[in-house]
Image (cartoon, grey):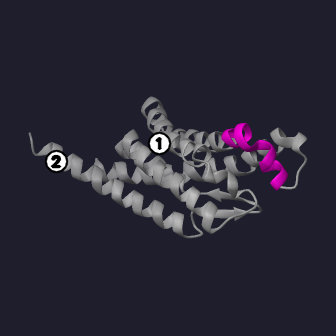
Amino acid sequence: MNHVKPAVHTRKMVVTAMLAAITIVLGTTPLGFIPIGPTKATIMHLPVIIGAIIEGPAVGLALGLIFGVFSMIQAVIAPTVVSFVFLDPLVAIIPRLLIGISAYYVYKATKSSLVSAAVATLTNTIGVLGMIYMIHGVQFVEALGADKATVGKVIAGIGVANGIPEAIVASVVVGAVVGAIKKIRD
């Protein structure tokens, strides 16, 4: 019986390392942060969600941290007019940590990778934009060239424009990947 735990531990380490490598590749190439005007859409949350569903919330937290750190790095090496908000760890890291936690617990409750992926993606979108609104809202909207009186509308518009497509893509990709992994494991 003692030989089972090392195998599970080794599998978790390998899965974490593979998903971390994918996250790093996404973070260092244009694949992870897709420019859409002055903002960027992302697929970097996909490995975080997959890791959390497959290996648990600790793996999701670790991968979310990598995602968050790369958000900060991107703000320095490939800045846009609104990148200054991603230099703030409350914007760049905290919501990314919550992706893994929400993905794991929603999956545990629903047994649906599609629902888990959608909720985790929206956790990221709402978390990032909520932090921007609370901490940097006026400066963010002014950097976009909009009237500071439209802070809520502008941030909500970005949430709809980025969040919904990201949630759909996440549901499709995560559903396929988790389904394939489960077939292999069964």
**Mark 2, secondary structure of its residue:** helix
- Report the magenta stretch's main SS: helix
Residue 144 lies in what quarter of the image?
bottom right
Are there few (<14), some (14-19), or many (20+) residues within 10 Å of tag 1? many
**Mark 1, secondary structure of its residue:** helix
Name the spot of residue 23 as percent of width and height, x first. Answer: 47, 60
Name the spot of residue 175 as percent of width and height, x first. Answer: 49, 49
- Return the residue at label 1: 100
Which comes before the other along the chain, label 1 or label 2? Answer: 2
Is 179 situated left or right of 35 in this image?
Answer: left
Look at the image and tell me whether residue 50 can be seen.
yes
Residue at image location 87% in from the left, 44% down from the top: 148
Name the foreground residue: 101 vs 70: 70
Are there few (<14), some (14-19), or many (20+) residues within 10 Å of tag 2? few
Name the spot of residue 127 as percent of width and height, x first. Answer: 62, 40
Residue 167 sits above or below residue 19 on the image: above
- Return the residue at label 2: 6
Quick one: quadrant of the N terminus?
top left
Is 28 situated left or right of 81 in this image?
Answer: left
Is 26 a magenta residue? no
Residue 57 lies in what quarter of the image?
top left
Residue 183 sits above or below residue 102 on the image: below
- Amino acid type of the residue tagged 1 in the rendering: Gly
Residue at image location 79% in from the left, 48% down from the top: 139
Residue at image location 73% in from the left, 40% down from the top: 133
- Amino acid type of the residue tagged 2 in the rendering: Pro
Separation (CA) of disc 1 from disc 2: 24 Å
Name the spot of residue 71 as percent of width and height, x first. Answer: 58, 56
Q: Which stretch is magenta?
A: 130-143
Residue at image location 83% in from the left, 42% down from the top: 151
